[in-house]
Image (cartoon, rainbow, N blue to C red):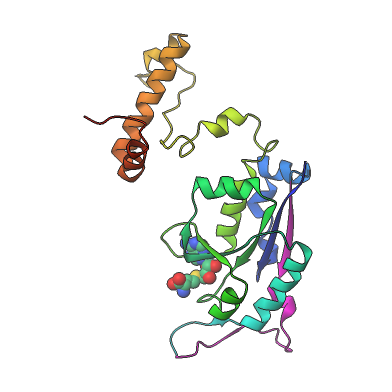
């Protein structure tokens, strides 16, 4: 089995592996299911002060990461793994979803470029044809957390990271629906009972109940997902 490679270009290499070194992700890293190579962009600075940013042409607030410095970091990483797609974590990117995570998880890995300040000079992004990926419609201070989100959501899909493939396959988004609610012992907690059907031992009825719950929750909470589900012919409305 080949190792899924995460290669990260960042100004804060000490942030990694961070949460990715813990729990299932950390164990999978130790077990060689995925690998992590983190490069400090600042190592490519050329002046005494190790400067990586400058004022934006045209004026305005904040600083911009210089194209020559980012380019040198990317060239080094790409030379070490030319087959990996290059992703720039950016609020302007296409929002990450489970489908893209699966595609990436099935591939050899990814080079992840983390921005800071106002972002990165556009020319180096164009020159490297970086795919821009966002983790949602809000602004963080840097691309490191988004890179970790992307890595974790990909590696948990790789066999050997999470124990059962069933638990991954049935989750929200995998079926086009949000997941049904979960219950465990005690059967009565603070006067609240577990739905009786779950205690029946009748597998087919439990499955049907869970499916109906998943449909109801999706219809209520995510009309966008529900419309796509209906459009895909899963259900006839009315
Ligand atoms: N000026 C940028 C804008 O308005 O689009 C925001 C820059 S942000 C302060 C600095 C860096 O954080 C970005 O270059 C990007 O790498 C990362 N970042 C912030 N929010 C993100 C998000 N929602 N998804 C992915 N990356 C994000």
Looking at the picture, how far across and down is residue 130, in whole percent? 58, 68
**Quarter holding the N terminus?**
top right
Asked if residue 44 is among those painted magenta in the image, a careful observer would answer yes
Looking at the picture, how far across and down is residue 181, in whole percent? 41, 28
Furthest residue in direction left, as rendered? 238
Looking at the picture, how far across and down is residue 197, in whole percent? 39, 13
Q: Residue at x 45, y 65 (%)?
A: 139
Q: Is residue 216 shown left or right of residue 85? A: left
Q: Is residue 58 shown left or right of residue 117? A: left
Answer whether residue 189 is visible to the viewer in this image. Answer: no
**Relative height, residue 80 to residue 232 (above, below):** below
Asked if residue 41 is among those painted magenta in the image, a careful observer would answer yes
Residue numbers of the magenta segment:
34-58
**Relative height, residue 5 to residue 65 (above, below):** above
Return the residue nearer the eye: 145 or 170: 170
Q: Is residue 173 shown left or right of residue 75? A: left
């Amino acid at each position: 089995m080949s190792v899924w490679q995460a290669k990260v270009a960042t100004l804060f290499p000490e942030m990694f592996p961070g949460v990715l070194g813990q729990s299932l992700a950390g164990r999978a890293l130790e077990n060689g299911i995925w690998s992590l190579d983190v490069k400090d962009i600042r190592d490519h600075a050329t002046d005494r002060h190790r400067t990586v940013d400058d004022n934006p042409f045209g004026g305005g607030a904040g600083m911009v990461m210089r194209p020559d410095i980012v380019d040198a970091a990317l060239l080094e990483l790409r030379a070490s793994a030319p087959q990996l797609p290059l992703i720039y974590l950016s609020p302007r990117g296409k929002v990450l979803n489970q489908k893209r995570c699966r595609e990436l998880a099935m591939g050899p890995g990814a080079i992840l470029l983390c921005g800071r300040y106002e972002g990165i000079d556009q020319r180096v992004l164009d020159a490297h044809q970086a795919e821009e990926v966002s983790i949602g419609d809000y602004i963080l201070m840097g691309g490191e957390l988004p890179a970790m989100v992307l890595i974790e959501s990909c590696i948990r899909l790789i066999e050997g990271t999470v124990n059962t493939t069933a638990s991954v396959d049935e989750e929200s988004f995998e079926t086009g629906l949000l997941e049904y609610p979960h219950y465990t012992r005690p059967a009565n907690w603070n006067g609240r009972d577990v739905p009786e059907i779950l205690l029946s031992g009748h597998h087919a009825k439990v499955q049907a109940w869970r499916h109906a719950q998943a449909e109801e929750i999706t219809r209520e909470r995510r009309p966008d997902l529900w419309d796509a589900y209906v459009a895909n012919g899963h259900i006839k409305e009315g």
